[in-house]
Image: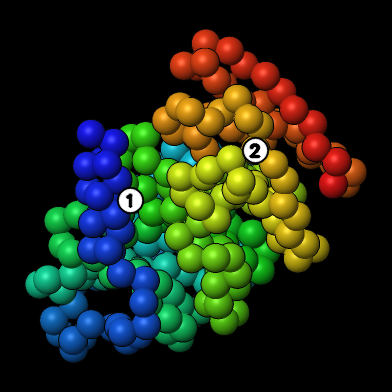
Amino acid sequence: MKEIAIIMTFSLILSCKSDKKKLALPKSKSEISIINHAIDSSKNTNIANQKVEDSTEENSDTYLKNGFSIIYTTDDEDQYLIYKKGKRIIDTLNSCSVGLPIKNLGYVISDFDNTFILGQSYGSGNPTVVELYDKETAKKLIKEYSAIIDVDSTNQILLYSENDVPKLTDKMTLFDVKKNIKENYDFPKEVFGEPEILSRIHLINISDKTFTIEYEFNDYRNTKRQKYTR
């Protein structure tokens, strides 16, 4: 059953594309239906300390700091996330078949000063795949198909794994985005041998010299904290 679930999740990831084959708005303007195109300040999404589980509204535009936006559009076959600054189109971040949930297409997890985190989720229990984008260039700053562990939006720090289903030999990566510093750390050994490894690890506090995680193990019956030196 575990193998079937992994295959189904991988199929969903492949059905939502983040490649460079579609870099312009799909088809002509007359064939595009833009959902919620008018800016409604009550629906703007400037995120601070938002948990990963809090997905964006269905089919909504997202407005980031410093004049950037992610506009949802669709044609007869696909739905798209168009990345813009003002009226200028920078890139198409993702495309996905019409009918699939917006969380498969992508949603903003954290809006930092010069970067932002875009997540893609594929159902309860599956890891949330993330990309960290440079705002000006839309360049990806971490390995493709990395999965989030937790994020400190105030301090602009991302904790993630390059393997969405990590093994004992894999590492957690702490990315201090403001300082552009990545550091790798061992996973706590107790989390292995059970499902949903990444969702059971939480970033509790962080300083310039240390950070602390809390994690559940033994079928969520036990909780433990571990401090790491930066």
Disc number at residue 103? 1
Q: Residue at x 75, y 55 (%)?
A: 183
Disc 2 designates what residue?
Answer: 187
Residues 107 and 187: in front is 187
In the displayed orientation, state which residue is furthest to the top.
221
Q: Say whether residue 215 is visible.
A: yes
| Image location (x, y in percent) of residue 93 | 40, 72
Q: Quadrant of the N terminus?
A: top left
Instruction: Tell how many labels.
Output: 2
Is 53 situated left or right of 58 in this image? right
| Image location (x, y in percent) of residue 173 | 66, 51
Residues 189 and 85: in front is 189
In the displayed orientation, state which residue is furthest to the right.
209
Residues 142 and 166: in front is 166
Give the SS element for disc 1.
helix
Q: Residue at x 80, y 37 (%)?
A: 228
User: In the rendered view, would you say 219 is above or below 94?
Assistant: above
The structure's colour scheme is rainbow
| Image location (x, y in percent) of residue 42 | 44, 50
Disc number at residue 135? none
Is 218 situated left or right of 174 in this image? left
Amino acid type, mark 2: Phe
User: In the rendered view, would you say 194 is above or below 112?
Assistant: above
- CA–CA distance between discs 1 and 2? 27 Å
